[in-house]
Amino acid sequence: MGTGILTPAHLTQAAISKIKSADIVHALVPDPLGLSTIKKLNSKLCNLAEFYYDINSDRNGENRLESYDRMVEIVLKDVFHGLKVCCIFYGHPGVYVYPSHVVIEKARKAGYKAEMLPAISAEDCLYADLGIDPGRCGSQSYEASQYLFYQHTTNTFANMILWQIGVVGDESLKRLEPSEFGLAMLADKLSNFYPQDHEVILYEASRLPIMDYRSDKIELNQLVQAKVSTITTLVVPPLSNLPINREFCEKWNIDLESLN
């Protein structure tokens, strides 16, 4: 399950019930307030952050992926011992959370019942905070490095959401900051589709009730110098309004007036 972005406010009733009834709770939650909230619901808490990749040593593996595999082993060890295990991740447990999917897959293959509960994600907060309705012109959502290295289609008529620009360009999974040319590579690729003065948004959801969300509007040509963190998301608004596919609409006798 997930904590949502503001743990005390975003925990669902279903999640709270599961936490209370668990024999042990494994949690990967970055903020102390979130951990404190969970511990009040169930004191039998294992902090998975202790098994996270240490950038200054080889502790918990050689990169973030190996540390996630270590977390999977820790969680499944309790499952295989017959405990009722609750595993909690920050945000939505199925969105950019590698260990949750692996844990469920391996537990089910071993014959154990495993389920994932939905939670409020950073994308949910983004739509609310920035007033973006994906129903208006569509939305495309990519992990930033994946957008760089693979042949994703860029639709300039829809919103584009690029996640994890705080580590963009790092194929090693060892950095907690962009690679040396990460932001430059991202700006370069986007400039193939958008003008240099196109307005983009640096977004960060609020993680504490006393904090406001981040919504810094900059021009694309300012991206290389932008200050980003591990939770920064880049939102690229549409370049123009949706054009009508006249050939298709005329073929099927669609009333074009109703589409304007």
Image (cartoon, grey):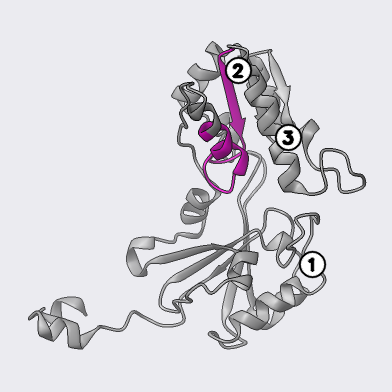
Q: Are marks 2 and 1 in contact (CB under 8 Å)?
A: no
Residue 183 position (above or below residue 10): below
Q: Position of residue 99 (x, y in %)?
A: 62, 38
Q: Are marks 1 and 3 in contact (CB under 8 Å)?
A: no
SS at badge 2? helix
Q: Earlier in the sequence, mark 1 or mark 3?
A: 3
Residue 94 belongs to magenta span: yes
Q: Amino acid at mark 1?
A: Ser
* Gap between marks 2 and 1 measured at Cα: 39 Å
Residue at 54% of width from left, 63% of height from top? Answer: 142
* Gap between marks 3 and 2 measured at Cα: 15 Å
Of the pair 162 and 79, the residue shown nearer to us: 79
State the mark number for residue 179. 1
Q: Earlier in the sequence, mark 2 or mark 1?
A: 2
Which picture quadrant has residue 174?
Answer: bottom right
State the mark number for residue 70. 3
Q: Amino acid at mark 3?
A: Arg
- Kindly tell me whether residue 138 is visible in this rendering: yes
Of the pair 113 and 203, the residue shown nearer to us: 113
Of the pair 38 and 105, the residue shown nearer to us: 105
* Gap between marks 1 and 3 measured at Cα: 25 Å
Residue 31 belongs to magenta span: no
Per the rendered image, the range of residues in magenta is 83-105
Residue 102 position (above or below residue 108): below
Which picture quadrant has residue 87?
Answer: top right
Q: Which residue is mark 2?
A: 80
**Crowd rating for badge 2 (residues with CA inside 10 Å; few <14, some 14–19, many 20+):** some
Q: Are marks 3 and 2 in contact (CB under 8 Å)?
A: no
